[in-house]
Amino acid sequence: MQLPVNLLEVSIHNSWKYQAAFPPLGFVPFFENELGNGDTFGLYWPIGRENIEPIVAETWHDSWQVQPTYSTLSSFLAASQKAEEEYPKSPSIDEDPASPRALFYAAKESVRNQNVDSAIMLLEKATTVLPEYTDAQSLLWAQYVRVGRTAEATSIAIQAIISPPCFGARPHKALRWLCSQQETLFVEDDPIWQIRNKLKLVYGGTKENTDYPLLLTAIHQYLSQSHFVQAVTLMQTYAALLSSETVSFQERYSFESKEFSAWQVEVSSKLPHGSRYFQF
């Protein structure tokens, strides 16, 4: 994992170990501007981009969300210095042109102003920096559909479905649209495409949920295809969703958080740029 050149300007949690789905694998908290109660800033390496310096993300523990606020540690440090004793505000797109969160909110404004081309450009940039940015993927899917770019919309819908809930809501509209699409050669071997008509993307409040075995099978299929980026992404999503279920539900589906986390770390070592397990 590529470390920031100015890493020593923050105080990393040296004892941090990934053992549960939140925060996600690839996130490492630091002490600066920590609010307590699990709300903290930290380094986050987007999946498949471990050879690039991490972004700085912010965890919202009560809602199990991660906000991809700053594009680099340098950007965070500049905002923190400017804020002095106050909590640093999220940057605007002018202050941090590569901030995934700033790009996403700028894109939403472009959509409101009916400027689809601008929204697509901003969202493509946001999802390049952070491919598993679920909310940005969902909004980009909608814009691709709007302008008739069906092939891109299909790929983005699949990416939104496998991306973690900490980065956005389950993409129900994208799934419904995907179910309406005819067979297409370029995704016919994709596990999510194959099970799209069986998925519901609704979780919690039931004794059983057929999505979980479907998603677990999809993980194994991605692994058998050596599509390790997709496998690692979906594993994070699977872990997060199941972790939000009751203990008895997890037991019915043979889910044990520490064991699954260890499997995630193991699989991540097969990524093109190596493991997502951080050791300081």
Image (cartoon, grey):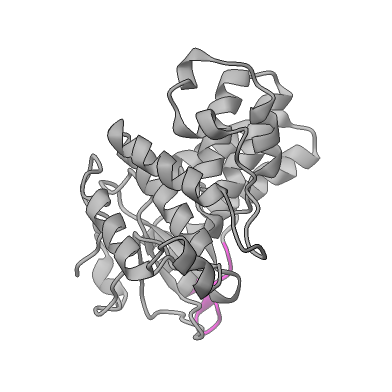
Range shown magenta: 82-90
State whether residue 252 is above or below residue 221. Answer: below
**Residue 41 spot, x, y in % from top left:** 44, 71
- Which residue is drawn at the image coordinates 24% and 58% (left, top)? 3
**Residue 260 spot, x, y in % from top left:** 34, 61
Q: Quadrant of the N terminus?
A: bottom left
- Which residue is drawn at the image coordinates 35% and 54% (left, top)? 45
State whether residue 169 is above or below residue 6. Answer: above
Q: Is residue 83 magenta?
A: yes
- Which residue is drawn at the image coordinates 39% and 43% (left, top)? 219
Give the left or right position of residue 229, taking residue 165 as reference. Answer: left
Residue 140 occupies quadrant: top right
Give the left or right position of residue 274, taking residue 87 as reference. Answer: left
Give the left or right position of residue 205, taking residue 184 as reference. Answer: right
Question: What main secondary structure does the magenta stretch of the protein show?
Answer: loop
Q: Nearer the viewer, residue 264 or 150?
A: 264
Q: Nearer the viewer, residue 60 or 78?
A: 60
Residue 108 occupies quadrant: top right
Residue 71 showing in the rendered view: no
Q: Nearer the viewer, residue 132 or 170?
A: 170
